[in-house]
Image (cartoon, rainbow, N blue to C red):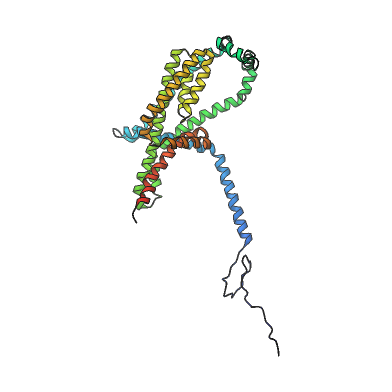
């Protein structure tokens, strides 16, 4: 008997991951995997992502300018819209922007000379203030309790000699050149932001219309309504936050002048700027002002601390709910979470924009997500 010799099939099935393309295979379709091409495309994709990330990093300052200008434009738009009911939009924009420039410039010209004068007097009298502080009964009592731990008088003298040394002041400021560069950069950035704000304010509606063109026609009306609600919430939030900060600044100026605190105009301005930061801004400004008042006298610092504790309660339970609830209806827990998360991700600017972003998210959820979920199929 003759044994039949078995031959290997002419078209073997392709193994997984094979680089071969065998024609005529019937059981398994032809597969061709080019590992080199996949690796090359993947590497180019990673390289492109790194390039884009580098460009965004290099343009970080410009993007911040654009974001701040757009934020301010949305904040001024409600005032422009209110004036637009009585006049043309172009005239309303000019009036609002001119008013902002005049108020800002007036504050600078009114406050800066006063701040310089008070700061000069404070620096000249600083040694006497420190001497009176170290010889006060409060410090002597603390020294008697902590005499074995720390010498307050010696520490104060060391701090005073350090501050009075011009070389140390230059070192703390990062050098005269660095300080001058920072001032020039800040002034340039402020001018850029103002110019961008004017452009955004003038072209805000055309920007919205251009954005609407990217949405299908059957959804354009609802998208436009949603966008108006979101931008309106951001604008009302900016106006409300500036209003709260202005109240804190004005009341601080009046109160600090009454109690004879050092540099009342400067620290009223500090209170205004600090109050622009949600949640922790007012508290941070109050701590700074109270510590400076301690150099005037412990009693002045105590009175200032009591005032700011009372003011923060009034702001938290009376002013802020009445002003901000009309601007953005955001639950308290979400306000805290948004502000903390924004501050962690983007420092002060992140904290400023976190709450309107949270309000915008709530609006989108209420007008887009919930109706879809509630719709009957």
Front one among 312 and 199: 312
Image side of residue 172 versus residue 305, left or right = right
Q: Position of residue 336 (x, y in %)?
A: 46, 35
Q: Residue at x 59, y 56 (%)?
A: 41
Q: Nearer the viewer, residue 250 or 324?
A: 324
Number of numbered discs visible in the structure rendering: 0
Which percent across, then down, holds residue 82?
32, 33
Q: Is residue 310 left or right of residue 17?
A: left
Residue at 59% across / 47% down in the picture? 50
**Occupied quadrant, residue 5:** bottom right
Q: Does any portion of residue 362 appear in the rendered image?
A: yes
Quick one: quadrant of the N terminus?
Answer: bottom right
User: Which residue ends up furthest to the bottom in the rendered image?
Assistant: 1
| Left or right relative to 304: residue 40 | right
Q: From what the image shows, is residue 261 above or below residue 31?
A: above
Which x, y percent locates residue 61?
Answer: 53, 36
Residue 132 horizontal/vertical position (percent): 56, 9
Q: Is residue 119 visible?
A: no
In terms of depth relative to the viewer, which is nearer, 73 or 278? 278
Placement of the C terminus among the 4 image quadrants: bottom left
Q: Residue furthest front?
A: 145
Establish if 73 lies above or below 218.
above
Q: Residue sitting at 54 percent across and 39 percent down?
A: 59
């Amino acid at each position: 008997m003759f044994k039949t010799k078995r031959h290997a099939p002419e078209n073997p099935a392709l193994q997984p991951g094979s680089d071969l393309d065998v024609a005529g295979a019937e059981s398994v379709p032809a597969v061709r995997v080019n590992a080199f091409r996949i690796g090359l495309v993947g590497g180019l994709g990673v390289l492109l992502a790194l390039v884009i990330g580098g460009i965004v990093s290099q343009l970080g300052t410009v993007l911040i300018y654009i974001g701040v200008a757009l934020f301010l434009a949305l904040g001024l738009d409600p005032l422009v819209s209110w004036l637009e009911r009585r006049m043309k939009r172009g005239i309303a924009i000019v009036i609002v922007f001119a008013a902002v420039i005049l108020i800002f410039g007036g504050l600078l010209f009114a406050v800066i000379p006063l701040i310089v004068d008070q700061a000069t007097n404070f620096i000249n009298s600083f040694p006497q203030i420190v001497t009176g502080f170290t010889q006060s009964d409060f410090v002597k009592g603390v020294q008697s309790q902590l005499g074995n731990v720390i010498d307050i008088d010696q520490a104060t003298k060391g701090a005073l000699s350090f501050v009075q040394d011009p070389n140390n002041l230059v070192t703390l400021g990062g050098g005269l050149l660095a300080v001058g560069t920072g001032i020039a950069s800040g002034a340039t950035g402020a001018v850029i932001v103002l110019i961008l704000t004017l452009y955004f304010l003038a072209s805000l509606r055309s920007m919205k219309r251009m954005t609407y063109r990217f949405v299908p026609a059957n959804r354009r009306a609802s998208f436009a309504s949603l966008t108006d609600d979101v931008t309106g919430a951001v604008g009302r939030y900016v106006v409300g936050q500036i209003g709260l900060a202005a109240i804190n600044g004005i009341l601080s100026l009046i109160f600090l002048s009454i109690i004879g605190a050092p540099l009342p105009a400067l620290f009223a301005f500090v209170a205004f700027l600090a109050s622009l930061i949600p949640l922790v801004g007012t508290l941070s400004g109050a701590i700074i002002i109270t510590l400076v008042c301690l150099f005037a006298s412990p009693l002045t610092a105590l009175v200032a601390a009591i005032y700011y504790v009372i003011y923060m309660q009034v702001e938290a339970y009376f002013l802020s709910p009445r002003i901000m609830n009309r601007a953005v209806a955001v639950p308290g827990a979400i306000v805290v979470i948004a502000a903390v998360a924004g501050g962690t991700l983007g420092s002060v600017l992140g904290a400023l924009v976190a709450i309107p972003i949270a309000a915008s998210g709530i609006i989108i959820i209420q007008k887009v997500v919930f109706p879809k979920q509630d719709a009957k199929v």
